[in-house]
């Protein structure tokens, strides 16, 4: 199933094990077999970029949007430029759109074809984001998927699912948790989880 995502310069079938993954796994096995790397250490590094370092940039964008109405307006108008003013830009973030959650609409992001993800603000995509079940079920039964992530929305809240491509990637701006009036942007950042910026979580909840 070839497709035209511009960041994929080869044709592949989107099976769970594409060319690059197979090559990386072969390389990893070689290094582990030779005793040059510790697989647990590799896992820890990847997890750090998935969950800690990467998403902290996005959290800064969200906290700024919550505390600075001018920035929020700029973010709505042209997310790529607004995010770049905070120093986050580059590959995987060339064309960004910010999706603001409201009581009426919850936004959730998927890449149905592969794993397009806004690297400058979220880092590396989590394994589940790249998995076939998430990619198909996010579209067909988003409410059930959210429930599995521990998110239950009011009946009246519409869920809109956005399909990422290499040309356009999304950052969900979760709703600011109640009871945080007067908090500084730095304090608010701690409430912004990675999943809340993909739309599979809510700010202020545990990931
Ligand atoms: Fe993709």
Image (tube, rainbow, N blue to C red):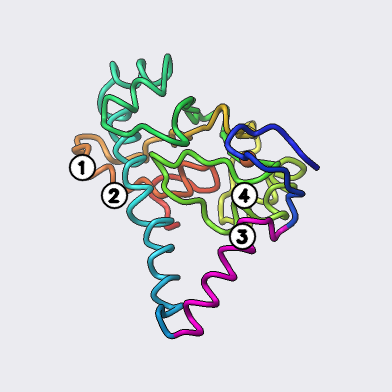
Q: Classify 55 as above or below 83.
A: below
Query: Of 164 and 9, which appears nearest the observer?
Result: 9
* Element assignment for label 4: helix
Q: Is mark 2 within 8 Å of ligand 1?
A: no
The disc label shown at residue 21, or none: 3
Q: Which residue is mark 2?
A: 190
Given this view, does label 3 or label 2 mark the residue nearer the observer? 3
Sequence-first disc among 4 and 1 = 4
Q: Residue at x 47, y 27 (%)?
A: 96
Start and end of the magenta stretch? 16-34
Q: Which residue is mark 1?
A: 186
Q: Is residue 41 left or right of residue 132?
A: left
The disc label shown at residue 146, or none: 4
Disc 2 to disc 4: CB gap under 8 Å: no
Q: CA distance from mark 2 to mark 1?
A: 7 Å
Q: Is residue 173 left or right of residue 16?
A: left
User: Ligand 1 appears in which quadrant?
Assistant: top right
Tell me which corner region of the image, top left, top right, bottom left or bottom right, holds residue 157: top right
Q: Classify 164 as above or below 136.
A: above
Total marks in image: 4
Sequence-first disc among 2 and 4 = 4
In the rendered image, residue 39, in percent from the top left (x then y), is placed at: 46, 77
The disc label shown at residue 51, or none: none
């Amino acid at each position: 199933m070839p497709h035209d995502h511009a960041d994929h310069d080869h044709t592949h079938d989107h099976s769970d094990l594409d060319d690059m993954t197979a090559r990386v796994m072969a390389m990893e096995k070689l290094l582990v077999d030779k005793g040059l790397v510790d697989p647990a250490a590799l896992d820890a590094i990847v997890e750090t970029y998935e969950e800690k370092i990467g998403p902290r940039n996005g959290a800064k964008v969200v906290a700024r949007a919550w505390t600075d109405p001018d920035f929020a307006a700029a973010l709505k108008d042209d997310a790529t430029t607004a995010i770049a003013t905070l120093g986050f830009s580059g590959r995987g973030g060339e064309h960004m759109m910010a999706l603001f959650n409201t009581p009426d609409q919850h936004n959730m992001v998927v890449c149905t074809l592969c794993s397009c993800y806004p690297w400058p603000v979220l880092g590396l995509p989590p394994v589940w984001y790249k998995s076939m079940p998430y990619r198909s079920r996010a579209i067909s039964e988003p409410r059930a998927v959210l429930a599995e992530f521990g998110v239950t929305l009011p009946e009246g809240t519409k869920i809109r699912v956005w399909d990422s491509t290499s040309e356009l990637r999304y950052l969900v701006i979760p709703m600011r948790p109640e009871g945080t009036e007067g908090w500084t942007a730095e304090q608010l950042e701690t409430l912004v989880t990675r999943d809340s910026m993909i739309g599979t979580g809510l700010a202020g909840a545990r990931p």
